[in-house]
Amino acid sequence: MLVVEEERYIHEDVERIESSIADRVRDDPKHIRNLLNRDHEIAQLLDQIQEQAKHLQGIFNDDVGSTARDLEHLGAVDSFGEFYNQLNELRDHHARYPNEQAENSELRYKTKRSGDGTGLAPSIVDSLFSGEEAYGRFFDLNTSHEAFLNLPNVKRLTYLQYLENFDNFTPGLGGVKRAEKLTDQYFKYVGDLAEYLTLFRKRTKPLEDTDKVVSEFDAEFEKAWDKDEVKGWQMDQPSADGTTNIVTNAEAVWCDDCEREFKNENVYKGHLTGRKHIKAAEQRKQRQPETGEETTDRKGSIVSAKRVKERAVAEREYRVKRLASSMSTERSDTRVNVERKQGMTERERQQELDNLLNVSETPRGGAAEDGEEEGEDGEEKIYNPLKLPLAWDGKPIPFWLYRLHG
């Protein structure tokens, strides 16, 4: 295929995709399943336009000089002779493959319909959501809730309480102490939670660039971390004896094992023989191999390594907070839905799920929609916003052809 013919084909294909996108944008599905399916189809078509544009840009750059060679070849030979040579090649091809089906490019990007007369078409979103998510209306954080409950020393929260506090990482409000956040188990938990929210946003908002949004969140975190302004992860100031003192007044003393502040040194010394302090000291000693905590004589050598681990955990926590705030509507709807389902029987829940699936299987482009698409005489409505001349088939000619002929 000549390069100029390939350029023409790409331009035509892009125009067909744009027309197909316009057809889908004019469509206004009422059910959330069909609406999401339309948005995912548009997102796929937009990705295809970008791929074609990159290919076309490479041809325009002509790094290997193929366009110049083709133009030189066309000018150096007999035009009619070259035309008949290509025509003979086409005839030979079809003679070798007489049963080869010709592709109808008009139908390539049309909305797919089934051929069984029901009008149902395979939906992209059918396999993207669980029944609990109801096509992206609600979160399904049951797996994250179970992982949270398996963390050591966490507050036992119900699922409804967890939905209220899953992005609150403050100790005492369902969160975990700072030292316990450096375990592999907690790192996996918060990482999986951030990944679920990211993928959920991609699935429910396919026309938005979620990767760009997450990158902006990460950039915000970078600035806050560099300024030591990430709440709950400020840099500790070690004292001369190697312990970390985080105090609110001059006489107060901080206990690293208990992670508490004591009013003065006498109170601090008095609690050292208590059962809570002894238990906390033993737990901290057990965590040292996993979290990177060391004894005083080696603590200074591993501060940077510990800080790197803290940064990785803090980054995922920050991402969870920002993603949760960007989907506050879904979060609020999820809480309401969970409260409502708690008062339903198992039969009522199953019946509601069945009703949701039945409604979602309403034929796409059914009789009501077909009536809008077709005129009184049954002919398909022609989309021609540029008022282009019509071809022999009654449809507008491609824009590039209109420009070519002036």
Image (cartoon, rainbow, N blue to C red):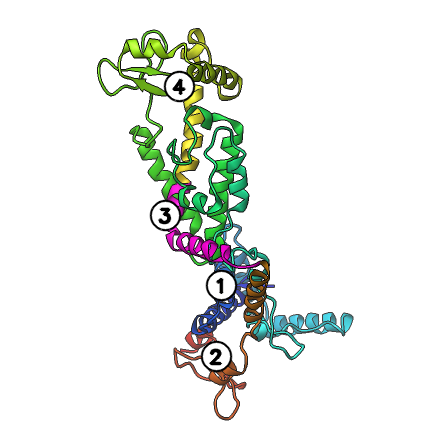
As rendered, which of 115 and 73 lies closer to the eye? 115
Dot label at residue 397: 2
Q: Taking 181 as reference, is 89 above or below it?
A: below
Q: Where is residue 86 in the image (x, y as percent from the top left)?
A: 65, 70
Q: Residue at x 71, y 74 (%)?
A: 91
Residue 354, quarter of the rendered image:
bottom right
Q: Are the residues tagged 4 and 2 within 8 Å (C-beta)?
A: no
Q: Is residue 79 left or right of residue 42?
A: right
Q: What residue is shown with label 1?
A: 36
Q: What stretch is highlighted in magenta?
A: 320-345
- Queried whether the magenta region covers residue 30, the answer comes back as no
Q: Earlier in the sequence, mark 2 or mark 3?
A: 3
Q: Judge depth for marks 4 and 2 and give the one in front.
A: 4
Q: Which residue is drawn at 48% across and 92% down?
A: 376
Q: Judge depth for marks 1 and 3 and give the one in front.
A: 3
Q: Residue at x 50, y 63 (%)?
A: 45
Q: Taking 325 as reference, is 297 above or below it?
A: above
Q: Where is residue 375 in the image (x, y as percent from the top left)?
A: 48, 89
